[in-house]
Structure formats: structure tokens, C-alpha cells
Image: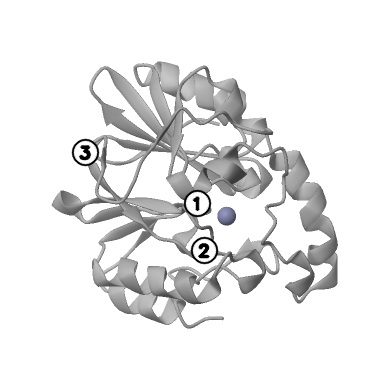
Amino acid sequence: MSEERIADGVWLLRGDLRKGMNIYFLEDADGVVQFDAGSRSMVKAARRAAQRLGGLKRVVLGHAHADHRGTAPYLDAPVHCHPEEVADAESDASIVPYMNISELPVAPVRWIYPLLLRRWDGGAVEIDDTVEDGDKVAGFRVFHFPGHAPGLIGLWRESDRLAIVSDVVYLIDSTRLRPLPDGEASVPHPAWAWDHAKAKESVRRLAALEPATVCAGHAEPLRGENLRSTLERAAEKY
Ligand SMILES: [Zn+2]
């Protein structure tokens, strides 16, 4: 398992279940910033990738769910997130209080998620500082995209219209634990949402940026001529 260069100064490390968990490395002065922290099983791979890329300067969490904070406590680097994600990041709970796993439509998927979330989780993360809408991270602008989580953030680079957005959109079907058909995207299922109406609004806000590439928290980057309409449709999925 090793990182793959997906854009100028951007590498993607995929790991865990069907290589479904994404960690991004962003070139910065004298090293890299890690965006999102995947699952606990990716600690070694993340450490090696950061070393190869010049050393880890800081970890920025897209949000604090178990499968996005898993490596963060083990990397000996400062960890940052949005102010509204600090409490969940620093909590021992692998399942955040607003998740309603019982709303998932497929019974075996409903049963397995609590086990998966505990396996993916690396436990509580000490947050050293916060990042907010409008801040800069390794040449990207931070966007606050609340909904799936209260302090969910994405990163945007105007020069190549690249959006790295954690779980603002899913490129997988979380209700059936399988990929979505190529080229499709979806707002995350309401079972996961802190505020589903806001989650839909955030997908529409991402659509309005007219990205050329969308890098999500799970599955390979989505590229295309008309991602705006793909994302506008995605906002209406649930
Ligand atoms: Zn999530």
C-alpha cells in the first residue's frame, strides 16, 4: 500500500476495508500536511508516506468521525480541526451522539456498523488548534460545510478547481457498504447526519464552486466535465 500522486502537490493514501478510507497529503513548506486521518489500521502506512514526502507538519481533520480520526493520536504531530468538531474529536466515543444507525435500511449493515466504527477508531484525539472557514491550509482555502458533522470542513484550490472535501459527499453507498456506480455521488445518508438539511445545503455550496475534481473521504477522486450538475443531483439523493 502506498500513496498515489493525484494532483500538483497532492497525494492520496487509500487503506482499510476495500481500500475505502482516504488520507490526503498536501505539500507545504518543509514537509506535508495530512488532511483526514483514516482508520487506526493505517497508522504505519500514513507514517511511512509522510516520511517519504518530507515529514509530517500537522494533521487537519475533515471531521471527527471514527474513520476520519483513526491515525491522528499516533502520528506525533499537532492535530487541528474546526471549532465545532473539537468536542467529538476529544471524546472517547467511537459513535458520535447524533448518529442514528437504526435508520439504515439494510439490517446486516445496521448490525455491523457499530463493530466497524469501533475497529476503525483510534480513540480520543487531543486537538492543538482550530481552523475555520477562510483559513489557509497548504495553499488551499478552508470551507466550512456543516451537516454530516457540525464542524465538517473541505479544502478548495481555485487554480485547478480541486476540492478535497472529506464526507461532504459520498462516492460510496454507505447503506449497502459498496461503491456507487462510476461518476455518481450522494449526500451522506441521514442516519449519519448532525443536520441533514444543512448537509444538502453544503453539497449545493460545493456544486456552486464548479469543481473539476472532487476528492472525498472514501473512494477514488471524481473528475468530470460537469460535476456541478452531478453534485446538484447528489444533494437530492436522500
Ligand atoms: Zn463521516
For the C terminus, the quadrant is bottom right
Please count the marks in the image. 3
Disc 2 + disc 3, Cβ < 8 Å? no
Q: Which numbered disc flags the more N-terminal residue, 3 or 1?
A: 3
Q: In the rendered structure, which amino acid carries the disc numbered 1?
A: Gly
Quadrant of residue 91 within the rendered picture: top right
- Is 227 left, or right, of 109 in this rendering? left
Q: Please name whichever residue, 125 or 51, is drawn nearer the observer in this view of the structure.
A: 125
Report the disc number at residue 217. 1
Q: Please name whichever residue, 101 or 44, is drawn nearer the observer in this view of the structure.
A: 101
Q: What residue is shown at x 58% (from left), y 64% (from top)? A: 194
Report the colour scheme. one colour
Q: Is residue 63 above or below residue 230?
A: above
* Label 1 near ligand 1 (CB < 8 Å): yes
Quadrant of residue 1 within the rendered picture: top right
What element does badge 1 sit on? loop
- Crowding near the residue tagged with mark 1, few <14, some 14–19, many ≥20 C-alpha atoms within 10 Å: many
User: Which residue, given by chain and number where applicable, does mark 3 sit on?
Assistant: 139
Disc 3 + disc 1, Cβ < 8 Å? no
Q: Is residue 111 visible?
A: yes
* Label 2 near ligand 1 (CB < 8 Å): no
Q: In the rendered structure, which amino acid carries the disc numbered 3?
A: Gly
What element does badge 3 sit on? loop
Q: In the rendered structure, which amino acid carries the disc numbered 2?
A: Tyr
Disc 2 + disc 1, Cβ < 8 Å? yes
Ligand 1's image quarter is bottom right
Q: Is residue 185 visible?
A: no
- Is 71 left, or right, of 150 in this rendering? right
Q: Is residue 168 above or below residue 122?
A: below
Q: Is residue 55 above or below residue 235?
A: above
Q: Which numbered disc flags the more N-terminal residue, 2 or 3?
A: 3
Q: Is residue 32 above or below residue 68?
A: above
